[in-house]
Image (cartoon, grey):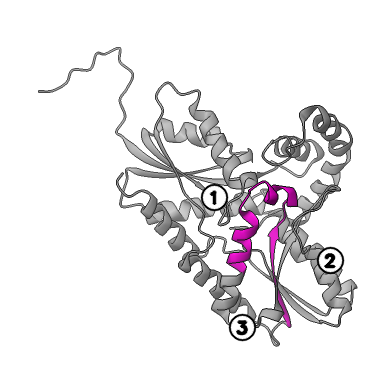
Amino acid sequence: MTQHIPDTHPPVKKQKIGVLLLNLGTPDATDYFSVRRYLSEFLSDKRVIDYPSWFWQPLLQGIILTSRPFRSGAAYKSIWDTRTNESPLLVYTRSITEKIQKEFSPHDEIIIEFGMRYGNPSTASAMDKLKEAGCTKILSVALYPQYSATTTATAYDKVFDYLKKMPWQPAIRTMPPWHDDDAYINILADSITEKLETLEQPPEVILTSFHGLPKRYLMQGDPYHCMCCKTSRLVREKLDWPEDKWINTFQSRFGPEEWLQPYTDKTIEKLAHDGVKRIAVVSPAFVCECIETLEEIAMEVKDEFIEAGGEEFTYIPCLNDRDSHITLLSHYIRHELQGW
C-alpha cells in the first residue's frame, strides 16, 4: 500500500548517513579583529581554560585580547596560504574532507562534511548541511589521534549543543582516538623515514613535540599525556631508534602554572648547548599543518635551536592529505559506520 503524504507536509528527503570531520579552527584572516574574534571564542572555552569566568573573562577581554591578536596575527601571516587566502589548517582540512568523500563516492548515501570548533566553517553550519542533505545518522570524527578534554571532548560538546535545538535528532556516534593503532603508527613512522631519507646525515636526536596542557589537567584525569607518550614510544620502537636519542616533549605553553614537561623549547636549547648539532622534530598530535607546526616549530623553535648553537634543524611534516593518511582515516570511518 502506498503511503499518502499530504501536500502540506514538509519534503521528505532520502535518508543518508553523515560523517562530520571536526578540527580546531582558524581565524578568517590575519587582521587584528579577525584574530581577536577567534582567540576570544577559543580562550573562552571552559574545556580549554577552566578558570572561573569572573576571574578569567576580565583578564582575557582586557589585557590579553588587547595585545595578543597583534602577535598571533603576525604569526598567522607568516604561514598564511596566499593562493587561497586561508590558513593551512583550513586548506588541508578541506582537502582531507574532499579526498575522503572520493573514497566513499560509490556510496551516495554517505556524505562527508567538516566543521571547526572555533571560527569558520562552524560545527553548526556543517551540521546544517548534513541535516539539509537528509542525514538521519551522523558519525562525528574529532581529528585528534590522542584524546583530550581540551580538543576531542569540546569538539563533540559542540555537536551535542547543536542537537539540543533539533526537534528531530539524528542518531549520533563519536569516533574514539587512534593514538596506538598499528596502522597509524606505521604511516607515522613511514613519514619520518621518508623525510630522513632526504637528509645527507641523519639527526642525532629526534623529538616528538605534542601540544601541551597544564599539568593540573593530567592530575584531574585527562589521558592525553599518557596517549602522547604511548604514540611516541610505539613510533620509536617501530623505527628501532635508540631510546636515548628520542625525546618526547610538549609545546605551546602559556601562563604561569606548570605544564606537561619536558618543554620543547627548553629541550632543544639544552640539546644545542650540550653540543647536539642535528635534530629533527615531528608533531604527531596534529593531523595537518597549522600555526603550531609551521610557525612555532618550523620557524620559532628552529631559530632557537640555531641561535643556541645547533646547525641542522629538520621539521617532519604532518600527515596532512597524503594518500596513506586518507586511506587510514577512511578505514577508521568505515569501521565506526558498521551496522549503519
| Residue 123 visible in the snapshot | no
Q: Earlier in the sequence, mark 2 or mark 1?
A: 1
Q: Which residue is label 2 attached to?
A: 266
Question: For the residue labelled by badge 1, is the local secondary structure a helix, a strand or a loop?
Answer: helix
Magenta region: which residues? 204-232
Q: Which residue occupies 60% across, 76% down? A: 236
Q: Where is residue 222 drawn, in percent x and y?
A: 63, 49
Q: Nearer the viewer, residue 178 or 78?
A: 178
Q: Which residue is label 3 attached to?
A: 197
Question: For the residue labelled by badge 3, is the local secondary structure a helix, a strand or a loop?
Answer: loop
Q: Residues within 10 Å of mark 3 (few under 14, many from 20)?
A: few
- Which quarter shows the C terminus? top left
The answer to if 219 sits in the magenta stretch is: yes
Question: Cα distance, mark 1 to mark 3?
Answer: 29 Å
The answer to if 229 sits in the magenta stretch is: yes
Q: Earlier in the sequence, mark 2 or mark 3?
A: 3
Note whether 278 is above or below 177 in the view shown.
Answer: below
The amino acid on which the numbered mark 2 sits, given as a three-letter code, is Lys
Note whether 208 is above or below 125 in the view shown.
Answer: below
Disc 1 or disc 3, which is closer to the eye?
3
Q: Quadrant of residue 78?
A: bottom right
Q: Which mark is residue 94?
A: 1
Q: Which residue occupies 80% across, 46% down? A: 73
The amino acid on which the numbered mark 3 sits, given as a three-letter code, is Glu
Q: Where is residue 185 drawn, in percent x and y?
A: 52, 69
Note whether 199 is above or below 301 in the view shown.
Answer: below
The amino acid on which the numbered mark 1 sits, given as a three-letter code, is Arg
Q: Which residue occupies 82% across, 42% down? A: 69
Q: Which residue occupies 39% across, 50% down? A: 336
Q: Where is residue 275 drawn, in percent x and y?
A: 86, 83
